[in-house]
Image (cartoon, grey):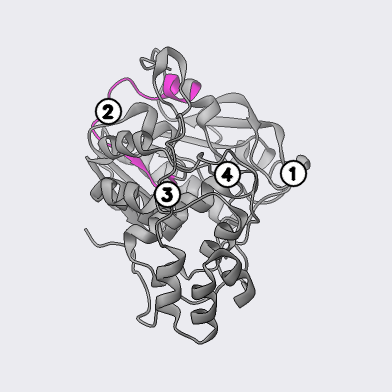
């Protein structure tokens, strides 16, 4: 399976408005001097030079000791309601599809044998591909980082498209676990621009979690593509879970920019159209969305369950708190919670 393209051949470039001084602050003095002289590849090697290996962080655990934590903190994560979502999933299905995989809370809870996962975020897709195909190389690369403000801005300033897939994946996971409040946000050029956070020093280094995720992803086909592509693969009897981004203001609150071009109301109509096409094909379809007049109208005629979701990810307090959501299905019934949930 093809990987996400790794970009140009000229070595890493400073991005996201990162100055040479910012890069210099996160690398050794030698790396700073070389970067100033334009020897970017050697500067990258200095930034990625291995410090002492960090102590593995203790992974968070759910009830009965089963690890419920997805690999990444992700806006709109369903981790806190995964028990309710699993109870609403069909008892039996052929294959699993999640075209807005994001943090993949439901996928990692259910761990289906055959699955198709996709997302338009190339950094996220590359991370999942690396965890599936090269978990030990990723553990090694991640262990070369350290959780300091200087290191964070040095790594954030690297061009991800110029990195090898494993180093690119390590950068993604490291920044996600050390940035401010787990927020994922990009600027108009699609570059990650969240400032440094204040997490526990080793929170980014969880090798056991990576290895468990590798086992879950072994049977997954993973791609970076538009969500509608799943309509070409889904067959009667397959289970499709749709969890699109919520546009800013959809349920009366502010939104985030997860992708350079955002996710518009027109896209919400496309998601609803995909839901109906999959329903007509004989697929088992479940969708999560904000509870508002628009979504109630888009999914009129289908089963709707209401949920209250607590949000902890956000750049300010106004973006956090309790939110009203709906879960829409084209099939009846409930299942018991999965073991360990």
- Judge whether 212 appears above or below 116 on screen: above
Relative to 66, is 315 on the left or the right? right
The answer to whether residue 282 is seen in the rendering is no
Frontmost residue, 328 versus 341: 341
Q: What's the CA distance linking mark 4 and mark 3?
A: 32 Å
Residue at numbered disc 4: 75
Indicate the secondary structure of the residue bearing disc 4: loop
Upstream in sequence: badge 1 or badge 3: 3
**Residue 120, image quadrant:** bottom left
Relative to 129, is 52 on the left or the right? right
Q: Quadrant of the C terminus?
A: top left
Q: Is residue 6 located in the magenta-colored stretch of the structure?
A: no
Frontmost residue, 195 versus 324: 195
Q: What's the CA distance linking mark 1 and mark 4?
A: 14 Å
Upstream in sequence: badge 4 or badge 2: 4
Mark 2–mark 1 CB contact (< 8 Å): no
Residue at numbered disc 3: 52
Mark 1: give few (<14), some (14-19) or many (20+) Cα within 10 Å: few
Residue at numbered disc 2: 93
Residue found at x 62% / y 55%: 149
Mark 2: give few (<14), some (14-19) or many (20+) Cα within 10 Å: some
Number of numbered discs present? 4
Residue 253 tag number: 1
Upstream in sequence: badge 4 or badge 3: 3
Mark 4: give few (<14), some (14-19) or many (20+) Cα within 10 Å: many
Q: Is residue 95 located in the magenta-colored stretch of the structure?
A: yes
- Judge whether 275 appears above or below 11 on screen: above
Upstream in sequence: badge 2 or badge 1: 2
Residue 178 locus on image (x, y percent): 56, 48
Residue 326 locus on image (x, y percent): 58, 31
Specify the segment rendered in magenta: 84-101
């Amino acid at each position: 399976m093809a990987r996400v393209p790794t970009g140009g051949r000229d070595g890493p470039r400073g991005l996201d408005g990162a100055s040479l001084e910012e890069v210099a602050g996160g690398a050794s003095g030698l790396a700073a001097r070389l970067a100033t002289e334009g020897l970017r590849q050697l500067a990258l090697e200095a930034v990625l030079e291995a410090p002492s290996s960090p102590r593995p962080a203790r992974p968070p655990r759910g009830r009965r000791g089963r690890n419920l934590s997805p690999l990444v903190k992700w806006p709109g994560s369903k981790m806190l309601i995964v028990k309710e979502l699993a109870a609403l999933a069909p008892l039996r299905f052929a294959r699993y599809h999640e075209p807005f995989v994001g943090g993949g809370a439901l996928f990692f809870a259910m761990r289906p044998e055959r699955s198709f996962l996709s997302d338009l975020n190339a950094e996220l897709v590359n991370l999942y591909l690396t965890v599936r195909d090269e978990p030990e190389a990723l553990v090694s690369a991640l262990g070369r980082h350290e959780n300091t403000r200087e290191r964070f801005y040095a790594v954030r300033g690297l061009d991800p498209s110029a990195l090898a897939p494993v180093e690119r994946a390590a950068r993604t996971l490291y920044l996600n676990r050390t940035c401010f409040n787990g927020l994922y946000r990009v600027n108009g050029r699609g570059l990650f621009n969240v400032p440094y956070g204040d997490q526990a020093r080793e929170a980014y280094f969880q090798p056991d979690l990576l290895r468990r995720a590798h086992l879950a992803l072994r049977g997954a086909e993973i791609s970076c593509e538009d969500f509608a592509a799943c309509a070409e693969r889904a067959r009667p009897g397959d289970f499709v879970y749709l969890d699109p981004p919520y546009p800013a203001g959809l349920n009366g609150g502010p939104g985030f920019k997860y992708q350079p071009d955002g996710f518009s109301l027109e896209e919400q109509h496309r998601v609803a159209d995909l839901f109906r096409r999959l329903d007509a094909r004989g697929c088992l379809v479940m969708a999560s969305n904000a509870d508002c007049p628009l979504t109630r109208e888009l999914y009129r005629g289908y089963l709707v369950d209401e949920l209250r979701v607590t949000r902890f990810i956000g750049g300010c307090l106004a973006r956090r708190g309790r939110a009203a959501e709906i879960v829409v299905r084209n099939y009846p019934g409930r299942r018991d919670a999965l073991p360990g949930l």
